Amino acid sequence: MSLAGKRIFITGGSRGIGLAIALRAAKDGASIAIAAKTTEPHPKLPGTIFTAAKEIEAAGGKALAIQCDIRDENQITSAIEQAAAALGGIDILINNASAINLTNTENTPAKRFDLMMGVNTRGTFLTSQAALPYLKKSAQEGRNPHILMLSPPLSMKGKWFKPHLAYTMAKYGMSMCVLGLADELKRDGIGVNALWPRTAIDTAALAMIPGMDVAFCRTTDIISDTAYIILNRAGKECSGNFFIDEQVLASEGVTDLDKYAVVPGTKEFINDLYVD
């Protein structure tokens, strides 16, 4: 497997899972556009598009840092066009950018609702839409294009809606894009899939949630290694799946996951949302 020569566009890749996926691809020499809005250091969250680009280049990849707020349609279009021009096209789109607010209905301000819907659902839809001409061209050139959403398997169980209705609707919007685009783009040979972790993943954003103990989490490496496997599969045959990281790794014979534990030797982990 290799992502050498692949041209990748990642939303929200200045830190966390998005950056981890970028760094894994960079080891093969992939060219990666990081599209995120963080250009100045955040007081609580590390990383900017420029520090991410430096890490990608240090890992062996080619990097392009693009400031982009994916709530803005014009910025999305501009970012995609800029990336395609600089990289010579786009083969892989990673819809990673996401906003989270785990509040019940009474305690979710309209501003937070709009943020989550704007970033998660609308941003994913519009970024995918803008990338389609380039992904279709990639398919015509036999470059095995993919769209990968960092979103959960769809479930209509009330327990996933009850505690944080707005977040669930916004996150499921990303997954519905997988469901629709996989069928819509089947003839084009573009693989469209979702990836979600079974356990909580240690990220700076997760650590900000009150009461969260990252000692019972896994590292971002488990997601980047899983994404790497998915993106190396034939998009014509691998599409419309809602992958869980552990299951993908097991399908490749990887069952010892201790190296992904934040604290090696940990046996009990915090289950992620939307995973029974």
Image (cartoon, grey):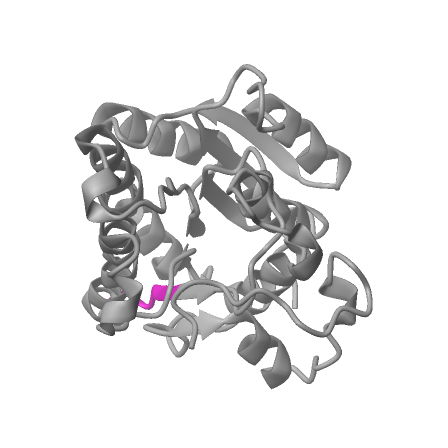
Q: Is residue 240 above or below residue 167?
A: below
Q: Position of residue 275 (x, y in %)?
A: 43, 72
Picture quadrant of residue 254? bottom right
Residue visible at 25% across and 61% down? 161
> Where the N terminus falls, by quadrant?
bottom right
Q: Position of residue 84 (x, y in %)?
A: 41, 35
Q: Is residue 261 above or below residue 238?
A: above
Q: Position of residue 25 (x, y in %)?
A: 63, 51
> Where the C terminus falls, by quadrant?
bottom left
**Count of marks, rendered view:** 0
Name the residue nearer the viewer: 247 or 116.
116
Span colored in magenta: 188-193
Q: Position of residue 80 (x, y in %)?
A: 36, 34
The answer to if 221 sits in the magenta stretch is no
Residue visible at 55% across and 40% down? 32
Residue visible at 23% across and 70% down? 158
Seen in the image, is 27 located left or right of residue 109? right
Seen in the image, is 113 located left or right of residue 248? left
Name the residue nearer the viewer: 204 or 158.
158
Residue visible at 47% across and 42% down? 10
Question: For the view shown, which residue lies furthest in the right direction?
Answer: 264
